[in-house]
Amino acid sequence: MRVAVLQTDPSYRNLISDVIKRLGHTCVTFGDGLVLSKALSRSKVDLLILHWNSSGLCGLDLLKSVCSSFGERVPILFATPDGVEHNVVCALTAGVDDYVVYPIRPGEFGARVDAAHIW
C-alpha cells in the first residue's frame, strides 16, 4: 500500500513514517499541503494521513479537495494534536474515515492504518 502523510512536525512525521514502513507499506511524507496536493495530481495513493494545521493548504481543505476531485475513494485518516470536538466533527462530516489525537501510540496507530486500508 502507498501512503501519503501530511505532517508539519518532523518528529511525528518520522514516527508515522516508521509505523507505516514497519507494516510493510510505502510511505511518502510532506510538510506542506500544497506540495502534497500537487503530488496527488501526479501519483496515486492508497491512504492519506493528514494533519489539521499545515502550511500551504490545511488538512481540512485538502480533505475536501480530495473528496470532491478523486474518481475513486481514498481512505483518509487525520493524525493531529487538535482534539477539539468541533474540529473532529468537522473532519468526520467532511469525509475523514478516522481521527487520531496525539500522542500516537504506535501499535494502535498501525492497527488504524491497516483498518483504513480495508475500507
Image (spheres, helix red, strand yellow):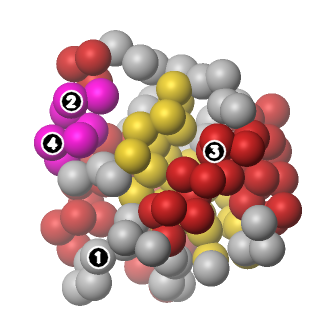
Q: Which residues are magenta?
A: 88-94
Label 1 environment density (alpha carbons within 10 Å; few <14, some 14–19, many ≥20)? few
Q: Is residue 102 above or below residue 110?
A: above
Q: Could you say whether the residue bearing mark 1 is in a helix, strand or loop? A: loop
Label 2 environment density (alpha carbons within 10 Å; few <14, some 14–19, many ≥20)? some
Q: Is residue 68 left or right of residue 7?
A: left
Q: Position of residue 66 (x, y in %)?
A: 30, 65
Asked if the residues shown at circle 3 and circle 2 are in contact, with their CB atoms under 8 angstroms apart, the answer is no
Foreground mark, 1 or 3, reads 3
Residue drawn at 28 percent across, 24 percent down? 87
Q: Position of residue 74 (x, y in %)?
A: 37, 72
Spatial distance from mark 4 to mark 3, Cα to Cα? 21 Å
**Chief secondary structure of the magenta portion:** helix
Q: Is residue 101 above or below residue 29?
A: above
Rendered-image quadrant of the N terminus: bottom right
- Earlier in the chain: of badge 1 and badge 3, it is 1
Q: Is residue 67 left or right of residue 81?
A: left
Label 3 environment density (alpha carbons within 10 Å; few <14, some 14–19, many ≥20)? some
Q: Which residue is mark 4?
A: 93
* Amino acid type at mark 3: Phe
Q: Which residue is mark 2?
A: 89
- Earlier in the chain: of badge 1 and badge 2, it is 1
Q: Could you say whether the residue bearing mark 2 is in a helix, strand or loop? A: helix
Asked if the residues shown at circle 4 and circle 2 are in contact, with their CB atoms under 8 angstroms apart, the answer is yes
* Amino acid type at mark 2: Val
